[in-house]
C-alpha cells in the first residue's frame, strides 16, 4: 500500500521578536509592542496584510504523524521547553532515520520555507533533506526540494492543481469530509497562547492538524487507486484504535 514510511508534519509559529527588535532598532521595547511594530511595518509593505514575512516566523511546535508498515502514531517533537533548534534537529533526524514521504497541507507555501529559513538561522544540518541527486541518484528525479516531485506531497498544492486561486483551507476541506477540523483553536490564536505559557495547547492543536491532514491523505490515496476500499477502511480503523488507546483528552475529543 505504501512504498515508504509516511511522515505528515505541521508547524506552529510565533513572531521572531528578537530579530524584529534588532531590525527595527527597538531595544528596551517590550515584546508586544515589538510585534505591533513588526505588523505595522508589514502592512506598509503589503498594502494591507500584517501576516509577517516567513523568515520572521519562529517555530514553537512541530507535530507529526508517522505511518510505517502496520504502525501509526501522532506526537509533537521535543517537549514544551525545547528550543527551536532542538525541534528542527529532531525533524531532520527523523528524515535521516526513516527516509519518508513527507505529507503536508500548504507545506510548500508555508511550513517548508519557514523550516528552511529557521534551519539557516539555527545552523541545522540535514544532508538527506537537501539531497538532489549529487550523492544519491534516486533523488535526482524525486527529492524534497522540487515542488512537483512526490517525495513531499503538499496536498493543498496537488489538489488545487498547483493553482493559487483554487487553494482551500485545511479546516474547510476537513469539515467537507466529515473530519473535526480546527476544534476551537486556529493559527491566529497561537501568539496569545504562547504569551500565556500554554505551549501544551499549541502542541495539541498542531497534532489535530496533522491528524486532519493524514486522514485527507488516506482519502487522496484512495481516489488515486493506491488504497482499495478494504485497505482504506483498515487504515481509518487503525487511526481510530490508536487514538482510543492513546487516551489524551484532545485526541479523545478528535476521535469523538
Image (cartoon, rainbow, N blue to C red):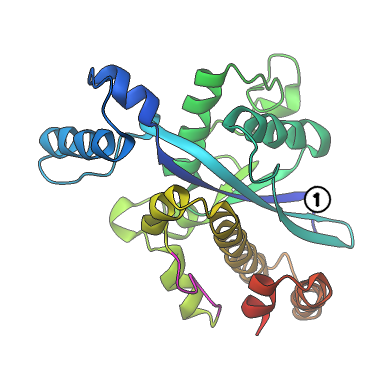
Q: What span is in magenta?
A: 179-185
Task: In the rendered view, tell whether residue 222 sits above or below residue 164.
Answer: below
Residue positioned 46% across, 79% down in the render:
176
Residue on which disc 1 sits: 3
Residue positioned 75% across, 80% down in the render:
229
Where's the C terminus, which quadrant?
bottom right
Q: Name the spot of residue 188 as percent of width and height, x first.
A: 36, 56
Residue 147 visible? The answer is: no
Residue positioned 63% across, 65% down in the render:
211
Tag 1 secondary structure: loop
Q: Name the spot of residue 137 as percent of width and height, x first.
A: 74, 22
Q: How many marks?
A: 1
Task: In the rendered view, tell whether residue 119 sits above or below residue 13.
Answer: above
- Viewed as shown, does residue 85 lie left or right of 31? right
Classified by dominant secondary structure, the portion drawn in magenta counts as loop
Residue positioned 46% across, 43% down in the render:
13
In the foreground, 142 or 30: 30
- Viewed as shown, does residue 139 lie left or right of 122? right
Magenta stretch encompasses residue 95 = no
Amino acid at each position: 500500500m505504501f512504498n515508504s514510511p509516511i511522515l505528515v508534519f505541521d508547524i506552529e509559529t510565533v513572531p521572531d521578536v528578537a530579530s524584529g527588535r534588532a531590525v527595527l532598532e527597538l531595544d528596551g521595547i517590550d515584546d508586544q509592542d515589538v510585534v505591533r511594530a513588526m505588523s505595522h511595518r508589514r502592512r506598509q509593505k503589503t498594502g494591507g496584510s500584517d501576516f509577517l514575512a516567513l523568515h520572521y516566523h519562529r517555530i514553537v511546535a512541530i507535530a507529526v504523524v508517522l505511518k510505517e508498515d502496520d504502525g501509526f502514531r501522532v506526537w509533537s517533537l521535543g517537549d514544551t521547553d525545547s528550543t527551536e533548534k532542538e525541534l528542527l534537529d529532531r525533524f531532520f533526524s527523523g528524515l535521516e532515520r526513516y527516509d519518508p514521504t513527507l505529507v503536508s497541507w500548504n507545506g510548500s507555501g508555508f511550513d517548508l520555507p519557514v523550516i528552511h529559513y529557521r534551519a539557516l538561522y539555527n545552523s541545522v544540518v540535514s544532508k538527506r533533506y537537501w539531497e538532489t541527486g549529487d550523492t544519491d541518484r534516486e533523488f535526482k528525479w524525486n527529492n524534497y526540494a522540487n515542488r512537483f516531485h512526490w517525495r513531499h506531497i503538499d496536498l493543498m498544492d496537488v489538489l488545487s492543481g498547483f493553482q493559487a486561486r483554487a487553494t482551500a483551507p485545511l479546516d474547510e476541506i476537513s469539515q467537507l469530509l466529515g473530519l473535526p477540523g480546527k476544534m476551537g483553536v486556529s493559527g491566529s490564536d497561537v501568539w496569545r497562547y504562547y504569551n500565556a505559557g500554554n505551549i501544551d495547547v499549541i502542541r495539541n492543536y498542531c497534532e489535530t492538524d496533522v491528524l486532519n491532514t493524514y486522514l485527507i491523505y488516506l482519502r487522496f490515496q484512495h481516489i488515486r487507486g493506491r488504497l482499495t476500499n478494504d485497505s482504506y477502511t483498515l487504515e481509518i480503523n487503525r487511526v481510530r484504535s490508536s487514538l482510543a488507546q492513546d487516551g489524551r483528552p484532545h485526541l479523545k475529543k478528535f476521535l469523538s
